[in-house]
Image (cartoon, rainbow, N blue to C red):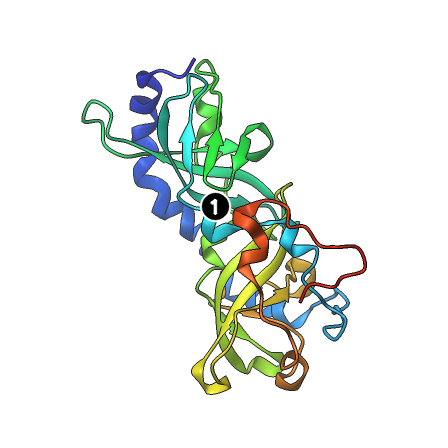
Amino acid sequence: MMKLDFLSTTTAIATVLVAFAFAPAQAQDTESSEAQNTASKDPIDITTWNYSDLYAGWSVENFLDADVYDEDGEEIGEVEDLVVNPDGQVEELVIEAGGFLDIGDAHFTYPWQNAEIVSPDRVEVEFDDENIESYSLFGDVEGESVGPRSWRITELIDDYAALDEGVRYGWVDDVIISQQGEIQAVVVQPDVTYGVGGPYAWPYYGYDGGFDPGLDYYKVPYTEDEVADLGIFDYDQLEGGAVAEVEEGETAE
């Protein structure tokens, strides 16, 4: 059972959250530039791309700040971030808890696969207080990563969104994940230069497609003309994160 002494113990790691955001810093610039130039994933045909499967997923923006409850049904904090592995799969929740007996804020991770995702705004967890170190923000990482690394979803949200040849189009407003935690799409809001419209959902290209979380932009291999015909991503069809009902033979845009 999760007790208050766990929160006291994890307070010591609260101050390292910022460090987690920047690690690893060295050699990042070189790897980032190489990653964007060595894309090996075949681009998805944007003219046949539709949103029907995406509407069965969850909005990360809605998921962040979800209330977290322990096994006794007590609210202990909220989801502050998601840790994504190099394959685009959410592997951990970053949970912020605090306000207990003047302890202050404490941050810790919890495995996605062990969490009960009741809805995008409610998560239930069960702690093993005999293995507290397993909830560290650093996990089992030792030394500096020199290749694709796990990264925080907030490293992608609010990045610039760029088209082919680096043309800036807008910014990343949200990320859509499946109910199994796999990244499905990146939701982009266009700059006013492109008129009033959006948001639009772009395919997610991970490390194999040239993505690097160390950069300040997310790039897709499409031109302005190619993305011009995308339909608006309709958040109402997400139904708050539940599976949207799409009639057989109907294509959701």
- Badge count: 1
User: In the picture shown, does residue 107 fall above or below 187?
Assistant: above
**Image quarter of the C terminus:** bottom right
Q: Residue furthest left?
A: 102
Q: Residue at x 64, y 50 (%)?
A: 244
> Based on the displayed image, in which of its 4 quarters is residue 66 positioned?
top left
What residue sits right under mark 1 in the picture? 63
> Horizontally, is 193 left or right of 207 in the view?
left
User: In the picture shown, does residue 190 fall above or below 138?
Assistant: below
Q: Amino acid under label 1?
A: Phe
Instruction: Provide residue 203's location: percent of width, then percent of height.
Output: 66, 64
> Horizontally, is 158 left or right of 220 in the view?
left
- Which one is nearer the viewer's eye here, 2 or 84? 2
Q: Residue at x 68, y 50 (%)?
A: 245
* Mark 1 crowdedness (10 Å alpha carbons): few <14, some 14-19, many ≥20: many
- Callout 1: helix, strand or loop? helix
**Residue 145 visible from this viewpoint:** no
Q: Residue furthest right?
A: 249
Q: Residue furthest front?
A: 247
**Image quarter of the N terminus:** top left
**Residue 210 visible from this viewpoint:** yes
- Which one is nearer the viewer's eye here, 233 or 227? 233
User: In the picture shown, does residue 247 fall above or below 91?
Assistant: below
Q: Residue at x 46, y 28 (%)?
A: 135
Instruction: Provide residue 63's location: percent of width, then percent of height.
Output: 47, 45
> Based on the displayed image, in which of its 4 quarters is residue 228 positioned?
bottom right
Instruction: Provide residue 16's location: percent of width, then percent of height.
Output: 34, 41
Instruction: Provide residue 47's location: percent of width, then percent of height.
Output: 74, 75
Q: Residue at x 43, y 22 (%)?
A: 70
> Based on the displayed image, in which of its 4 quarters is residue 45 positioned?
bottom right
